[in-house]
Image: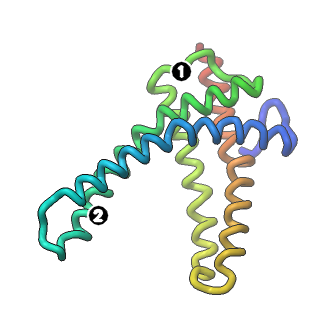
Amino acid sequence: MFRMLPAMNLRQRLAVWWSCLWRQLLFTLPLWGLGLGLAATWVFTRERPHHHWLASVLAALAVVLPICFFASLPLIGYTARRGFAVQGLVAPERLTFWQAVMVGLTTAGWSVVTGIPLNLLISPFRGTHYGLPAHFVVFLTQIAAALYVVLPRQARRLRLLSEQS
């Protein structure tokens, strides 16, 4: 689960991770901004009693968040493939839409699987004077999880897709 083919040291893993991360942020942040902007516009332009404002916000988020998440999956897949290719790692020449969705789902899924336990670990420290240091520790451990759990899963998925083509 933690091995990369070819074997990589920490510096090389960081280079691949950064190569994928900045591309993912560049292409997905505008999508999230547009989705949240549309949700805010919908909430603030509707005529409603004051006590229904929170219900409108929750309804808008319940619609927008899943749409943005699923719309970002192929973008994450395409950018991960490009990040691996730029670093000289095994990646297919092209990805179909569904292959990109599966690479994006691999990335997002393993990020969530590693992120939930880490965030649960700091929940007792929220609101205490240990809050900021605890968040910093979680930030560092999430980078380690990305390097040693998510990255190898992405590499495996891309290697298998490369072998199919």
Pointer 1: residues within 10 angstroms few (<14), some, or many (20+)? Answer: many
Task: From the viewer's side, name the closer residue of 58 and 35.
Answer: 35
Residue 15, quarter of picture? top right
Q: Is residue 43 above or below residue 18?
A: below
Residue at 71% over, 54% down: 143
Task: From the viewer's side, name the closer residue of 157 and 8.
Answer: 8
Residue at 30% over, 56% down: 40
Q: Position of residue 141 (x, y in %)?
A: 72, 60
Q: Is residue 28 left or right of residue 52?
A: right
Residue 123, quarter of picture? bottom right
Label 2 secondary element: helix
Query: Which residue is tagged 1?
Result: 95
Q: Position of residue 126 (x, y in %)?
A: 58, 80
Task: From the viewer's side, name the closer residue of 84 and 116.
Answer: 84
Q: Is residue 73 left or right of residue 4?
A: left
Q: Is residue 115 above or below residue 87?
A: below
Q: Position of residue 146 (x, y in %)?
A: 68, 49
Task: From the viewer's side, name the closer residue of 47 and 60.
Answer: 47
Pointer 2: residues within 10 angstroms few (<14), some, or many (20+)? Answer: few
Q: Position of residue 58 (x, y in %)?
A: 29, 64
Label 1 secondary element: loop
Mark number, residue 58: 2
Q: Is residue 69 left or right of residue 46?
A: right
Mark 1 and 2 residues: CB-CB less than 8 Å, in contact? Answer: no
Q: Amino acid under label 1?
A: Leu
For the residues labelled 1 and 2, the Cα–Cα distance comes to 35 Å
Mark number, residue 45: none
Residue at 87% over, 41% down: 9
Q: Quadrant of the C terminus?
A: top right
**Residue lying furthest front in this view?**
45
